[in-house]
Amino acid sequence: MHKTRQLRIFEDTDSLSGAAARFILDETERTIAERGNANVILAGGSTPRVCYEILASAGNGDRLRKVNWFIGDERWVATDDPESNERMIRTSLFGKTPNGCGTLYSWNACSKGIHATVKTYGDTVGGILDPDGGRPDLLLLGLGDDGHTASLFPGSLVLHENGELVPLSPDIPGYAAAVYVPQKKTWRLTLTPAILNKSDVVLFLVTGASKRESLGRLLKSGDGSAPASWIRGNKILYFASADVVDEKTFPADSFPAVYDLQTRIRIDS
Ligand code: 6PG
């Protein structure tokens, strides 16, 4: 179970993204100083782009050179496809300094069969993040309106090695999986809770009023209904913009009773 959960509320996406970039820099610098490198699992989607662009700017290349970056989930498209998370990451985090910001481990989606792709990435992740001592130091995640995170979507089906499709559950075997998402009629690739939950620190980035209900459910202790609630870590932070955490949906006086959050901080930009 997580030891610390904290909600930080920001006026807008820009101030949230700046704070997230500073948090990632601080966390990776601290870890690199202790161990010589840092392992970060990156979120996909659209929210993190501004944060990654901030990380890539301001001459941070040298500070991030010792970071191993992994992609928490990927769409089953080529890496130059506009829908590709890798494309979003390469153009935002690596755009200005292709080699300066550390090492990105790609799913290489669509370069070979989906089974082989999942096995290769699962082995890569397991080889770096799971030997004695290795682990994800920081996990970045987004949150969907339906409570999905990474590509762990409610109602999705996991492709087993034998070709069977089985309902998604928190205990998917292995570190990587191919998932069919019926509501999107598309295949996704995702790291599984087995590796995601080895992370020391988890940072959710949540913007957009459409996520009020899913964030509310996620913050409510004991509500394990959505995949995002399967995520564990020693410390879980939720950076949310004010359009998500409005007083009507999250009345301040309800927090101590309803949400098992140690702190709820409103940070004005
Ligand atoms: C993806 C993401 C997914 C994302 C959420 C939120 O590949 O889309 O991994 O889990 O984080 O859907 O997406 P937005 O940031 O675009 O709102």
Image: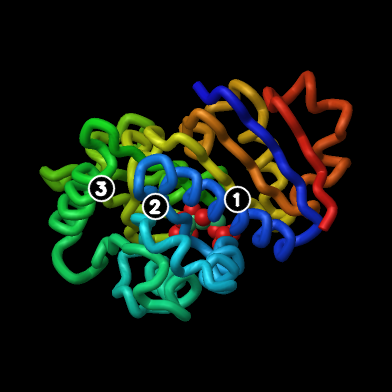
- Residue 177 relative to residue 258: left or right: left
C-alpha gap between disc 3 and disc 1: 23 Å
Q: Is mark 1 within 8 Å of ligand 1?
A: no
What amino acid type should be assigned to the residue bearing mark 2? Gly
Identify which residue is drawn at 74% across, 53% down: 241
Crowd band around label 3 with a 10 angstrom C-alpha radius: few (<14), some (14–19), many (20+): many
Residue bearing the label numbered 3: 125
From the top left corner, tell me how far across and down residue 215 is, in percent. Answer: 66, 41
Quadrant containing the C terminus is bottom right
From the top left corner, tell me how far across and down residue 175 is, in percent. Answer: 26, 41
What amino acid type should be assigned to the residue bearing mark 1? Phe
From the top left corner, tell me how far across and down residue 266 is, in percent. Answer: 82, 44
Identify which residue is drawn at 77% across, 60% down: 12
Residue bearing the label numbered 2: 72
C-alpha gap between disc 3 and disc 2: 10 Å
Crowd band around label 1 with a 10 angstrom C-alpha radius: few (<14), some (14–19), many (20+): few
Q: Nearer the viewer, mark 3 or mark 2?
A: 3
Crowd band around label 2 with a 10 angstrom C-alpha radius: few (<14), some (14–19), many (20+): many
Q: Nearer the viewer, mark 3 or mark 1?
A: 1
Residue bearing the label numbered 1: 23
* Quadrant in the rendering for residue 162: top left
C-alpha gap between disc 1 and disc 2: 18 Å
At mark 1, the secondary structure is helix
- Residue 237 relative to residue 234: left or right: right
What amino acid type should be assigned to the residue bearing mark 3? Val
Q: Is mark 2 within 8 Å of ligand 1?
A: yes
* Residue 145, placed above or below residue 227: below
